[in-house]
Amino acid sequence: MSEVYSKNSEILFIYDAKLCNPNGDPDDENKPRMDYETRRNLVSDVRLKRYIRDYLESIGYEIFVTKIEGKSVSATDRIKKFFENSNKIVNINKLGKEDLDFILSKLIDIRFFGATLPIKAQEGEEKGVATNFIGPIQFNWGYSLNKVDTVESSSITSIFSGREEKGEYGTFGKDWRVYYSLISFYGIISGYRAKETNLTFDDVKLFDNALINSIPKMASTRSKIGQTHRFLLRVEYKDQHIFLGDLRDFVKLDKTEGLRDVKDFEIDFDPLFNVLKENKDKIENIYLFEDSDLNIKGGSFKEKIKKEFVSIAELR
């Protein structure tokens, strides 16, 4: 295993959603989450982390926040099942450092995002116990860089078999979608927090890969098809004290209304390039993915970065 991550990183991740529902709100008929005053489409950090977890699980990693045999279970049951599968006999109410280190060594999503491990009170006990890991990788809520229009909903019908001899039943719902949303996320990786979950440099490389590949692979249900990763920038600083702030503030579109496709606008990364150039002495490495379909003002951002920064790695 590689050494524990000791730098700070800032992340700008951009993907788009076309004729789908990027993140339905269960409290509002599962409509796409919206800031109705600004017409910005919203996506929770939980939704993005779910894509990443599902992707990691699909390539063979064990995940803490998941179902067991297709069923949702409590954290207590999940920890019990984890140790059973690992053939380890432990008292989950008295987890020692060795037990916690074992959990961190096996459950990649806890190393990434942290977790609270609440253990239910056992018979005769007044209350349970909890162990809290603060994850070094965190995101703000995502929001669209453009003003988003929603498709007028059409009714959808689901038919399923009834119990015994009662035949079939149907349910009616609304099929809510957006026409086009260019969604941006800002995130950080904290070198200070990395030691709390034993996040390593190799883990961070895996995270880059998962962030790029999770959207096209895992956004494959009926309401989620139509999402494409467009841009990922991870700026790694020389120590664990530096953060420049929300990188989305340095990205602009020449057109923000009436968008229906990635070709309908030009994206301006010049302010972002300038702030990176001004802070060049603080930057250790730049990791970058750029989709060729993006219409970027002045040409490829990747090529501009290559000319200014020696330490750049292209992500794929």
Image: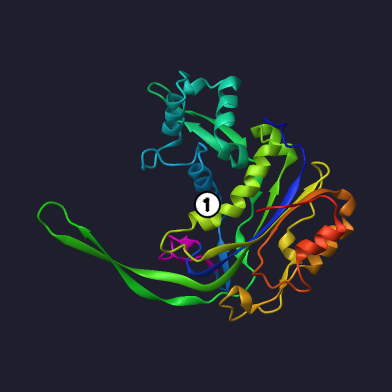
User: Which residue is the site of mark 1?
Assistant: 51
Q: Amino acid at mark 1?
A: Tyr
- Residue 249: quarter of image: bottom right
Q: Residue at x 61, y 57 (%)?
A: 141
Q: Secondary structure at mark 1?
A: helix
Magenta stretch: give its range.
23-34
Colouring chosen for the image of the structure: rainbow
Is residue 84 rendered to the left or right of residue 167?
Answer: right
Residue 126, position in %: x, y? 44, 26
Residue 121 shows in this picture: no
Magenta region includes residue 47: no
Residue 175, position in %: x, y? 39, 70
Q: Residue at x 66, y 32 (%)?
A: 198
Q: How packed is label 1: few (under 14 Cα within 10 Å), some, or many (20 or more)?
A: many
Q: Residue at x 40, y 66 (%)?
A: 29
Which residue appears farthest toward the bottom when viewing the image?
Answer: 258
Of residues 296 and 84, which is closer to you in this image?
296
> In which quadrant will I find the N terminus?
top right
Q: Residue at x 57, y 25 (%)?
A: 102
